[in-house]
Each structure stands twice: as structure tokens, then as C-alpha cells.
Image: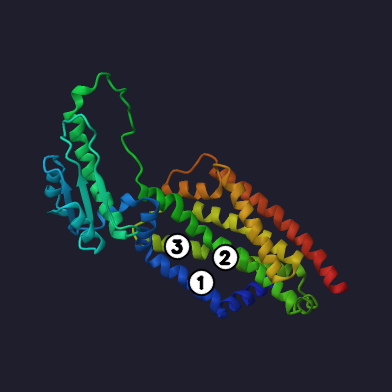
Amino acid sequence: MNARFIGLIMKKDLSGLLNEKTILLAILLQVFIAMFSSFLMVGLTTMYDPSALQGYSGVRYGIGYAGSEDSGLKTYLSESSQFRVFDMELSPAVAALKERKLSAVVYVPRTPPDGDEPVKITLYLVQNDIQSAIVNVKLKEIFLEYEEELRSLRSDRIELVPVALEFPGERSEGFYEFIYGLLIPLLLFMPAIISSALIIDLITEEYQRRTLETLVSTPMAITDIIWGKILACEVLVPIQAGAWLVLLGLNGIVVSHVLPVLLQVSASSMVLILVGALTALYYRERSTAQFVFSTAVVILILLALAFPNNPLNLVALLATGAPAAGSYAVLAGMIGLAVLLGILVTSYAKRSAKKTLSS
């Protein structure tokens, strides 16, 4: 292979990508999302862990209170700075909730706090509403405090001593788990998936436009052409992943071990790009190659996730500053797999060139 010819192909394809509006818009969209990643994470974290919403609102919500006046729960609600409590009958309160004049309705039966029957509290909320999710989380804290009071009042009924349970002093927050366990790996591997799909377009368009024969007739070898396209796709991955890390850092999200993270992502992307190149060389038709490659990628990802030391988990651990013991061994394994696939791509490209020239 000739490094000069590979560089020329890389330059041609990269300049072509800069003129491709679809690719540019995809990259700009990723950058735009990353610039507002803090806003994005609030919304996505809500889906992952609704309790993360409780610190994002300082509004006082109107609550309709119906039922017992002696339960003690009304005192907790009234003393809270987050709610404005209105004494109402149940039916008018629910009607006001439907008209969104109230944020929630709490109904407490007339069961004494120290009575024999359990206290069954009914909470009415608007279904599928973001405000209802916030109110639900805030009310949960008050209900837990009220539950502790009921347990204290009825503690004399306990005939057996409960088994003492010891929990860890520090518990990981859902927001932290979401950022480092899900969001960062997905963001960093997104460029790898895009580049691996892009290599199929770059190779198949040479076959469909019948320009490969022209390129092969020059002093360039088929391997120079294919590897120029592979490296053009590969160089985009650390650039985009690095941009994600910078923009996440500007949003106050600290990512440790940046260089090992980028190496892990780059090695994994090279494996995917080489698989895409093999698929394109075999099928030579874009839609078929993309379909087969997409199916293969899904299978590969599912197989990788079956193992604890998969690249996604390792990137998450590296980003938190606590790399796994086998992270560098997996990185070496990914590099070795990329080397084997590279040899296979080179060999198959030469065979493909002979068929092209003979036909």
C-alpha cells in the first residue's frame, strides 16, 4: 500500500463529506444537542429516574385535601413550602383537578392514626402529565414522613423484634448512574455507528457509479482506495467523540481518563468500520449492504452486552475514574480484532479488484 495514495483518497472523501449536506447536518445536530446536554439530561433522566425532578421546581402547587381532619397528614402538607392546601369535598376537588385548577387531590379516610385499621391514602393526579410527575415525587417525601409517624404511634403492637438491616452509607444517585452508565457511552459510540454506516456508502457508490475501474486503472491499488476510505471514516470518530467530551465538560460533567476512553471508542469503531467495509465489498449495492450490516451490528452489540467487560461498560467505568481491571486487556483485544479484520479486508479487496477488472 502507498501512504501517499491513501492520503489522497482520504482527502477526496473528507472534502466530499464536507460538501454533503446530510452529513454536515447530522454533525451539526450532534453538536447542537451536546451544547444543550444539561437540558437534555434533565428530560432523559426524568424517564430513567423520576425522583431526579424534585430539585428542579420551586413553584407552590395547589393541593385539594379531602377526608379526615385528624389524620395529621394535613399538618405535614400545610407546613411544606411546596404546596398550598385547600380543604374541599372529594367530588368538587376531583372536578377542579380535571379542569387543572389543582395539581393533585389527596383523600385521607377517617381512620385514627393510632387505630386498628390501616390508613389508606388515595392520591389523584392528571395522567401522563410532567407536572403530575413532579408533584408525585414531592408528595412522596411527605408521605414517607407521615408513614414514620404512624409507625411510631403503632410501635407498641410489634410483638417481634424486626431483623436489623445494614445498608451502605452512600448510595449512587439515579442522575449519576444515567449520565455515566447510559448517556456518555451512547454519545461516544454514536460517531462510531455513523462512521461504520458511512463506509458502506463510500464504497458502494464507487461500484454503482462505475468509478472504481477508473481509479484502479491509475497507479493506485485497490487496497489504497479502500484503506483511504476506511481511514477517512475512522478519523471522524475521535474528532466527534472529543467534541462530545469537551461540550459535556462545559456543562459541568467531568469525564476521567479521556485518552483511554477515546482509544477504546476508536478501536471499537475501527472494528465496526471494517465489518462495514467487508459487507460493502461483498454486496456492492447500498440498500442490501446497509440492511445486512445493520442486522449484523445489532447482533454484535447484543452479544457484546452479554459480557460484563464490554466496551460500553468499560467506557462508563473509565469515565467515572474507576477503570476495570481488564479494561486495557479488552482494548488490546479490540486492536487485535481490528488488525485481523484489516488483513481480511485487504485480502478480499484484492480478490474483488481481480473480479472487477476481469468483468
Q: At 76% across and 79% down in the image, what residue appears?
A: 210
Q: At 45% across and 62% down in the image, what residue appears?
A: 244
CA–CA distance in space, label 3 to label 2? 14 Å
Q: First in sequence: mark 1 or mark 3? A: 1
- Dot 3: within a 10 Å radius of its alpha carbon, few (fewer than 14), some, or many (20 or more) residues? many
**Quadrant (top left/top right/bottom left/bottom right) for the C terminus:** bottom right
CA–CA distance in space, label 2 to label 1? 9 Å
Amino acid type, mark 2 = Ile
The residue singled out by tag 1 in the image is 26
The residue singled out by tag 3 in the image is 244
Amino acid type, mark 1 = Ala
Q: First in sequence: mark 3 or mark 2? A: 2
- Is 14 rendered above or below residue 71? below
Would you say residue 44 is visible in this rendering?
A: yes
The residue singled out by tag 2 in the image is 194
- Is 244 rendered above or below residue 311? below
